[in-house]
């Protein structure tokens, strides 16, 4: 009798802690996302760089961005390589993918309402919090 009670109590506790951790991670990401999105929309390059993990992964055939200095020097070309990042971030919400999040944008020349959204900006949780990890063109 007591064994079943302890088992149920253990399952309940494990579920509670898992749900708490999941909710906390989502809340942490939402805070990060608001800060990151605001910095991108306002062209606050130093905040975007601070919230970026280096080396920053880039699409196929393009070298990763190794340092904050390199990122700041090429900021506009990096973030807006194929998408209009400000326009996209203002209207598109990130989606959870595995343990991270991603936001998918359309090409610059297409309207933001386009279903063709192959430009992926992705984020991961690191030891120091959420970070912008990379850009990808999922068509390549």
Image (spheres, helix red, strand yellow):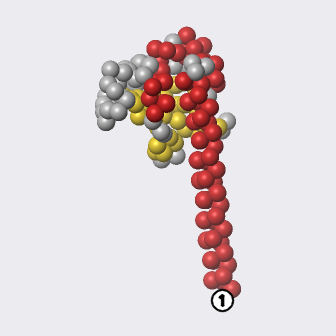
Locate residue 34, reporting x and y percent: 59, 35
The quarter of the picture where residue 41 lies is top right
Answer whether residue 56 is visible to the viewer in this image.
Answer: yes
Q: Residue at x 48, y 24 (%)?
A: 86
Q: Quadrant of the C terminus?
A: top left
Q: Residue furthest bottom?
A: 1
Q: Position of residue 44 (x, y in %)?
A: 61, 19
At x 40% / y 23%, what residue is drawn? 83
Percent position of residue 98, x then y: 48, 47
Is 79 displayed left or right of 67 in the figure?
Answer: left
Which is more toward the observer, 112 or 40?
112
Looking at the image, residue 111 lies above or below residue 45: below
The residue where tag 1 is placed is 1
27 is higher (above) or lower (below) than 17 = above
**Residue 16, image x, y percentages:** 64, 64
Please report the residue visible at 64 percent of the width from the left and 57 percent of the height from the top.
20
Give the residue furthest to the top: 73
């Amino acid at each position: 009798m007591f064994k079943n009670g302890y088992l149920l109590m253990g399952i309940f506790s494990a579920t509670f802690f898992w749900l708490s951790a999941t909710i906390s991670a989502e809340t942490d990401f939402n805070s990060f996302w608001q800060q990151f999105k605001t910095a991108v929309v306002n062209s606050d390059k130093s905040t975007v760089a601070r919230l970026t993990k280096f080396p920053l992964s880039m699409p196929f055939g393009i070298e990763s961005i190794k340092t904050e200095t390199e990122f700041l020097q090429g900021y506009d070309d990096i973030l807006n390589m194929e998408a209009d990042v400000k326009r996209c971030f203002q209207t598109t919400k990130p989606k959870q993918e595995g343990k991270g999040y991603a936001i998918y944008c359309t090409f610059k020349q297409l309207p933001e309402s386009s279903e063709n959204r192959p430009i992926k900006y992705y984020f991961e949780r690191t030891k120091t919090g959420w970070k912008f990890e990379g850009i990808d063109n999922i068509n390549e």
